[in-house]
Image: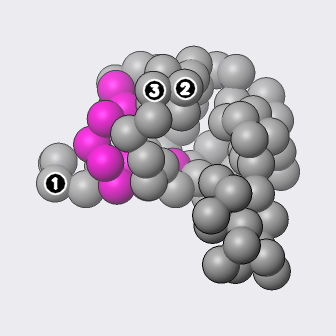
Amino acid sequence: MDNARKLHPELDYADDPIAAAVDADLLLHLTEWHHFAAIAPTRLASCAGALKVIDARGTLDTEQWREAGWIIRSLGRA
């Protein structure tokens, strides 16, 4: 992320999934990094502003996320 910070210092960066989700109205899952893909949706639900996620990588377990109360859209899936 250091390279991204140098290129775009005007953006906010989070080092972990919980920090990234605090008060978020929508989560965009744009990475295949394991620590972001493996996070339990119930953990994120306690800090997110709204339970909406777009999985652009197709790596999240949509069933698990829906069972946790999330509205999830996964690109390339029904």
Q: Which mark is residue 37?
A: none
> Is-magenta flag for residue 54?
yes
Q: Classify mark 2: helix, strand or loop.
A: helix
Instruction: Kindly identify which residue carries mark 3.
Output: 34
Q: Is residue 71 left or right of residue 73?
A: right
Q: Is residue 70 left or right of residue 42?
A: left
Instruction: Kindly identify which residue carries mark 1.
Output: 76
Q: Amino acid at mark 3?
A: His
Q: Classify mark 3: helix, strand or loop.
A: helix
What is the quadrant of residue 5 in the picture? bottom right
Region rendered in magenta: 53-62
Quarter of the figure with the N terminus: bottom right
> Is-magenta flag for residue 31?
no
Looking at this view, is 12 or 1 the one in front? 1
Marks 1 & 3, CB-CB < 8 Å contact: no
Instruction: Report x, y in % for residue 12.
Output: 80, 65
